[in-house]
Structure formats: C-alpha cells, structure tokens
Amino acid sequence: MKSVFTASSFVKEIFTTGYPKLLSTIENLLERISRDTDVKGVPPALTLEGKEQMIAAIEIFQTAFLGFCLSRLSDLVNSVFNMSSRGTVPSKEHISRIISCIQEEVEAVQLDARLTLLVLREISNVLLLLAERAEYQGGAL
C-alpha cells in the first residue's frame, strides 16, 4: 500500500478522500473472512495479528486523510478570519459555514468510533486556531 501511495496520485487521492469507506470495507472483509472460516477444531483463517496487519497496511491513507481534514478546516478558518481585515467580525454565514464543515467531517467518520476520535482531535486543533483568530480580530475592536 505504501508503494501505491507514492506511485499513483490518483489512487492516493481516492484512498485518502475515501478513507472512511476504505476502512469500513477492509473491516467488513476481515469480519466476513473470520465468520466464513470459523470451523470448530480448525485454527482461524485470520488471526488478530493478521487483522491488525491489514489495518496497519492502510494507515498511510489514514494519516493523509487526517491531514487533509485538518487542512480543509484550517484553510476555511483562515479565509474567514483574513488577517488584513483585523477588527471586523465574521458574518453569521461565515461562522455557519465553519460549523457545517466541522459537522460534515464528523458525519463522514461517525460509523467508526476510533476514526471519529482521531477526526475530533483534528477538529480540536481547528477550534484552537479559530479561537486564536477570533481573539486577534477582537483585539482591534
């Protein structure tokens, strides 16, 4: 997967932006393999270690997905709080757009608790950035 990540920008983009779906697909595949090969008295076809290795194989896309999430939200906050307009207050529409984008990020990962926590960590960084920008804007009022 690492070689695919570096070799093909198309595959990298698809697996990065679609990481929640990729993760869900891999987890469903692993569950199905475990369920379909569960035979009494026979060692499992897929061990816990094997499952962990499969998930680790796509971790590079998770890292890129989280970076992309942080970048999208940070860019939005930075565009709303343009440093050249110090002393102006963002409109309700701008703030609503930030909230909507945060909500979209959470909804995209809500089916996986672990991934949701990772995205929430990135959102907390964006909220800190938002607070810094708001404080800077308010300093001129």
Image (tube, helix red, strand yellow):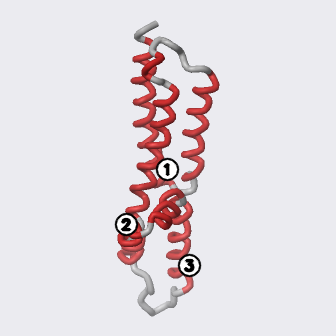
Going 62% across and 22% down the picture, which residue do you hit?
92
In the rendered image, is residue 39 in sight? yes
Q: Which residue is mark 3?
A: 32
The residue labelled by disc 2 is: 6
Q: Residue at x 49, y 67 (%)?
A: 11
- Residue under label 1, please give it: 116
Q: CA distance from mark 3 to mark 2?
A: 30 Å
Residue 47, which numbered label? none
Residue that appears at 56% across and 85% down: 36
117 is higher (above) or lower (below) than 7 = above
Mark 3 or mark 2: name the one nearer the start of the chain: 2
Crowding around mark 2 (Cα neighbors within 10 Å: few <14, some 14 to 19, many 20+) is: few
Q: Residues within 10 Å of mark 1 (few under 14, many from 20)?
A: some
Label 1's element?
helix
Q: Nearer the viewer, residue 20 or 71?
A: 71
Count all numbered tags in the image, as a single digit.
Answer: 3
